[in-house]
């Protein structure tokens, strides 16, 4: 591979000599490219960051130069597609450093070179796979959707399950224990409904709705031991706005949190997690498994006062050995302090930070254009604004990679319609780098794709259970009934 | 003379069949064909072609979609379907002749085409399927001709190729191959199980190694039937009809009188097809199509002819009335229902195209987009419907969501019939001149300045918001008053009348006068809201007559309907 890499580099040098003849004008500005990979930091194991050059020209020349090695690409179209092998070598050689990118264009017989920009290469690998749900924008109907795993080092995408093999079925809320692909849970709704639990090679279909639960289990969070899964149970209504660029809003009419004891096949609860007059949602275990974070709000008249519901970040103690959930609620971050609504708490694997989404109201931030990511430093209690990650549109559904530095999240910043996956690096002080769009083989992909990428989740390696096995169990096996909840 | 007679009889049946197919699809079923075009978004791009050709059956799907885009012109659609059916007939005839070495008796070779003709009125059966079968038949003789020694090799190569291009039509190809071996081929009967096994193995292998799909779809492909979980019985009959025609011709085709039997079978198929054709649905789709073309006068004329009572037609009619002679003047001349202004939001089946129309034409652009998006997301085959794509693009442009609108305009700009419109707006958005567009300005004038929520039970509130934003939105006012009348909300009706003078009504529409006169009988005087307008003597006289009939002939509703069926009072008491 290395040999090939040098051949490319050598060829590019020869080529460079013959292509850019004559006068070259140096432009002071940066080139317009899409996606924006200018001055971003990427993990060493990222796929080629292909992009389009949004300029008018007849030919282009793109040079990627590291301390060691260089890739040169020329073309007439708008797409700069970097050879995978060369890119892999270039990033590996320059891990911990940077790759300078020079773009030149030929227009009306004259070459123009734009200001050089850099792509910084972190030597720290992000988890190899991202699992997400892909679905087109809709309201209540859907036609095709699926849960897919994307290898971030290449452009390979494999289907975990989709509506092609399970027609009429909605699939959502995939979750993994500590980024481990051998411990996965997700839900199927409508046709073939049930909760699919995959653990150490065993795949089961569960009916999670027990006596006191008013709906099936929804948003999950695995306990690090892999023996418990906390779920929220939500009764959700959608409302549709008449004006503005809001598509819709989702309103939690009722919600509680339960903890599923996998070994005993029973639901655990506590008054703290399913209190009257309160909404509780989005559970998240701490990495040591001793605390269960969740979001809580006072109930109000809904849907009329949907925009006055604000959630605080709360936590209760959890005893892994006994399954006991404490009754004492610790309000970690109160809405009285933030005057905002908190959703989707996710603790970093080292337990230092808790990333959450902050919106003006509600607990489904993917509908709130003002939704931003925030970072709570659990050691100091300070909330970091993470401006470097946020945009003027929705940011939500964030996930930590297992090494605790890379995050992925969904954002609607490109067009306000579709959610796309961005990656960013968070340093030890909680400062983020400029996020970058998950690369695609065709850099124009995000320009025409109508798919949204929901709930990106990092996992360390590939999910091995096959699509037809999931299909077969979903179709043919009766769901195992989870036992009635017990309060400890 | 005998030769002439033979030639005439040989061509008469196919000719009658062709004329019949053309007349049926061109004049009795054209709206179904037109709607087929709205249900797809065929794009002239290499990427779209590649996307299709990379899956089994994709080539037929592509070819079928290509032809279907011309269905927006009814006679073009009828011509294409007729030509394809005739091609199917000719190929069936030639293959039967080639295999059996005898000209198919009577109308025997027309039977597969007749079955397809009976299937196609159902929009779930694709034109692509017909194309796929034709392609499989076209390939048959060239693939099978040649040295007998190479036959097995040729068949083994042909089967996966045919499968890839035509999907499930490979079953037709394989069954003809078997029929060929059972008859004239006759020497390789022992290899038949091998062919059958190979034909079955290919989809299994594709499903295992290339694509994830249901077992059914891996056999059939997406070219035949819009609902991917169903394999309808008629399709089995169709596939089976080809080898059956060959075998019948071979074994009993030369028997005396057989041609009469085949004529009878053919006639039976066509009569059955004519009987099960959905003419009621055809009429409903006609209203939907006329709304799409904004032919309001034509809708009203059509309604005067057939007095529609189904929700889709009434929704179209009321919208047309609001755009023409005034909804309030004539709405009760038709059998109105409480929900005939806005169709119900149902999560069952495909959200009909009409669902977004009243919202769009009144100024509820977000709601129109919601319904159009729901249509996109509820088509049975997950194909993009061009009509809804255009509607979503329009509403996004109106809302100023240009980046999002581009995602819908771009594919529309790659079509044959929407590209002109889409390219204009792509250009305006990209050049930044979109804000100067007149059409956009006109639509934006209707938009609400207030935000509120979709509530199908309180559309009166929503309509009031529209009027509060733009008082000149007369259709919205007509809808508001119609809403009250249809809900029998007479308090709301009287409140709504308070702005009638602002809306420029010189006189009160008859339905309003009828409602006012009725209210007068309850409160003992003509309501104050009628001050300056009054209620005509005719209406008062008619009310008296109605009151008399109501009190004396209450059990004879038919008589009351005959005399007063087009009054608001009849709606109030009997609907």
Image: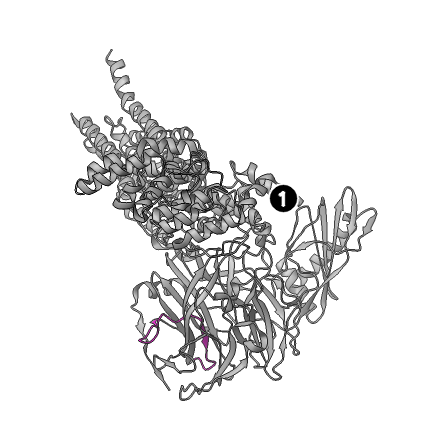
Q: Which residues are magenta?
A: A207-226
Marked residue chain, label 1: B
Look at the picture and state if B3 lies above or below B253.
Answer: above
Horizontal and vertical percent for residue B231? 30, 48
The residue tagged 1 is B434
| Res A294 seen here | yes
Q: Residue furthest top?
A: B1
Q: Is residue B278 visible?
A: no
Q: Secondary structure at mark 1?
A: helix
Nearest to the observer: residue A137 or residue A442: A137
Main secondary structure found in the magenta portion = loop
Question: Which residue is more in the foreground, A363 or B365?
Answer: B365
> In what quadrant of the picture does the N terminus of chain B appear?
top left
* Residue at the right extreme, as displayed: A23
Q: Nearer the viewer, residue A332 or B390?
A: A332
Q: Quadrant of the C terminus of chain B?
A: top left
For residue A176, side relative to residue B30 (left or right): right
Position of B199 relative to B255 (above/below) = below
| A216 drawn magenta | yes
């Amino acid at each position: 591979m290395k040999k090939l890499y040098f051949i490319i580099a050598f060829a590019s040098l020869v080529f460079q000599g013959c292509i850019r003849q004559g006068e070259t004008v140096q432009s002071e500005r940066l080139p317009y490219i899409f996606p924006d990979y200018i001055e971003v930091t990427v993990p060493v194991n990222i796929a080629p960051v292909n992009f389009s050059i949004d300029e008018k020209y007849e030919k282009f020349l793109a040079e990627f130069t590291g301390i060691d090695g260089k890739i040169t690409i020329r073309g007439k179209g708008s797409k700069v597609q970097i050879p995978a092998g060369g890119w892999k070598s270039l990033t590996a050689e320059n891990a911990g450093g940077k790759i300078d990118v020079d773009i030149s264009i030929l227009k009306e017989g004259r070459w123009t070179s734009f200001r050089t920009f850099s792509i910084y290469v972190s030597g720290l690998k992000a988890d190899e796979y991202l699992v997400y749900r892909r679905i087109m924008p809709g309201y209540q109907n859907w036609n095709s959707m699926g849960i897919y795993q994307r290898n971030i080092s290449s452009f390979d995408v494999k289907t975990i399950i989709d509506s092609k093999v399970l027609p009429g079925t909605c699939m959502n809320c995939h979750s993994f224990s500590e980024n481990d692909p051998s411990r996965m849970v997700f839900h199927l709704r409508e046709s073939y409904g049930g909760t699919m639990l995959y653990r150490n090679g065993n795949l089961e279909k569960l009916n999670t709705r027990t006596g006191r639960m008013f709906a099936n289990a929804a948003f999950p969070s695995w306990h690090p031991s892999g023996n418990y899964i906390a779920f929220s149970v939500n009764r959700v209504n959608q409302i549709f706005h008449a004006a503005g660029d809001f598509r819709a809003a989702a309103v939690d009419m009722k919600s509680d949190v339960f903890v599923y004891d996998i070994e005993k096949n029973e639901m655990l609860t506590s008054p703290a997690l399913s209190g009257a007059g309160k909404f509780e949602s989005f559970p998240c275990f701490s990495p040591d498994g001793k605390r269960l974070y969740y979001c809580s709000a006072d109930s109000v008249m809904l849907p009329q006062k949907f925009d006055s519901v604000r959630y605080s970040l709360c936590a209760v103690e959890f005893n892994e050995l006994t399954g006991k959930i404490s009754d004492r609620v610790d309000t970690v971050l109160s809405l009285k302090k933030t005057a905002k609504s908190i959703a989707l708490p996710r603790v970093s694997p080292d337990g230092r930070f808790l990333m959450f989404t902050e919106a003006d109201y509600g607990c489904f931030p993917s509908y709130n254009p003002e939704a931003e990511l925030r970072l709570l430093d659990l050691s100091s209690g300070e909330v970091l604004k993470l401006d470097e990650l946020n945009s003027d549109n929705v940011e939500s559904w964030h996930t930590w990679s297992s090494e605790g530095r890379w995050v992925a999240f969904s954002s609607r910043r490109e067009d306000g319609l579709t959610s796309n996956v961005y990656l960013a690096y968070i340093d030890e002080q909680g400062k983020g780098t400029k996020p970058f769009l998950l690369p695609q083989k065709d850099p124009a992909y995000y320009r025409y794709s109508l798919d949204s990428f929901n709930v990106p989740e990092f996992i360390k390696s590939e999910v091995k259970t096959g699509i037809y096995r999931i299909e077969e169990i979903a179709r043919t096996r009766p769901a195992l009934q989870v036992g009635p909840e017990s309060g400890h | 003379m005998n030769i002439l007679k033979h030639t005439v009889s040989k061509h008469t049946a196919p000719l009658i069949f062709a004329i019949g197919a053309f007349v049926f699809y061109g004049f009795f079923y054209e709206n179904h064909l037109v709607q087929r075009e709205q249900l797809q978004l065929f794009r002239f791009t290499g990427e779209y072609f590649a996307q299709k050709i990379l899956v089994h059956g994709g080539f037929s799907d592509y070819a079928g979609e290509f032809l279907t885009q011309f269905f927006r012109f009814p006679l073009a659609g009828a011509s294409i379907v007729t030509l394809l059916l005739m091609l199917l007939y000719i190929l069936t005839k030639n293959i039967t002749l080639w295999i059996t070495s005898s000209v198919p008796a009577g109308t025997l070779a027309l039977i597969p085409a007749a079955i397809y003709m009976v299937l196609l009125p159902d929009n779930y059966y694709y034109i692509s399927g017909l194309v796929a079968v034709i392609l499989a038949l076209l390939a048959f003789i060239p693939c099978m001709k040649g040295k007998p020694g190479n036959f097995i090799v040729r068949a083994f190569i042909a089967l996966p190729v045919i499968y890839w291009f035509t999907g499930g039509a490979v079953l037709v190809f394989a069954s003809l191959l078997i029929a060929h071996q059972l008859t004239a081929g006759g020497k390789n009967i022992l290899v038949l199980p091998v062919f059958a096994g190979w034909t079955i193995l290919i989809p299994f292998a594709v499903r295992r190694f290339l694509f994830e799909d249901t077992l059914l779809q891996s056999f059939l492909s997406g070219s035949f039937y819009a609902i991917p979980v169903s394999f309808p019985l008629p399709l089995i009959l169709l596939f089976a009809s080809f080898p059956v025609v060959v075998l019948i011709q071979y074994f009993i085709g030369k028997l005396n009188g057989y041609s009469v039997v085949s004529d009878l079978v053919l006639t039976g198929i066509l009569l059955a097809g004519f009987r099960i054709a959905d003419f009621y649905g055809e009429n409903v789709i006609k209203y939907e199509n006329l709304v799409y073309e904004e032919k309001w006068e034509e809708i009203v004329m059509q309604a005067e002819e057939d007095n529609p009572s189904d929700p889709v037609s009434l929704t179209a009619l009321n919208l047309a009335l609001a755009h023409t002679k005034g909804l309030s003047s004539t709405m009760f001349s038709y059998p109105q229902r409480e929900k005939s202004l806005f169709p119900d939001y149902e999560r069952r089946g495909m959200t009909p195209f009409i669902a977004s129309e009243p919202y769009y034409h009144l100024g509820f652009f977000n709601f129109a987009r919601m319904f159009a998006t729901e249509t996109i997301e509820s088509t049975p085959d997950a194909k993009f419907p061009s009509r809804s794509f255009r509607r979503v693009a329009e509403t996004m442009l109106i809302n100023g969501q240009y980046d999002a609108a581009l995602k819908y305009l771009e594919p529309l700009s790659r079509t044959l019939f929407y590209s002109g419109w889409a390219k204009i707006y792509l250009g305006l958005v990209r050049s930044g001149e979109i804000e100067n567009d007149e059409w956009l300005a006109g639509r934006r004038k209707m938009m609400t300045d207030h935000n509120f929520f979709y509530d199908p039970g309180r559309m009166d509130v929503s309509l009031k918001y529209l009027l509060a934003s733009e008082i000149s939105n007369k259709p919205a006012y007509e809808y508001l008053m119609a809403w009250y009348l249809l809900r029998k909300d007479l308090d709301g009706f009287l409140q709504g009348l308070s702005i009638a003078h602002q809306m420029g009504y010189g006189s009160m529409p008859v339905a309003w006068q009828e409602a006012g006169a009725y209210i007068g009988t309850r409160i003992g005087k003509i309501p104050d809201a009628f001050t300056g307008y009054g209620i005509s003597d005719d209406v008062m006289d008619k009310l008296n007559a109605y009151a008399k009939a109501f009190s004396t002939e209450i059990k004879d509703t038919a008589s009351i309907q005959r005399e007063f069926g087009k009054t608001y009072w009849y709606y109030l008491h009997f609907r």
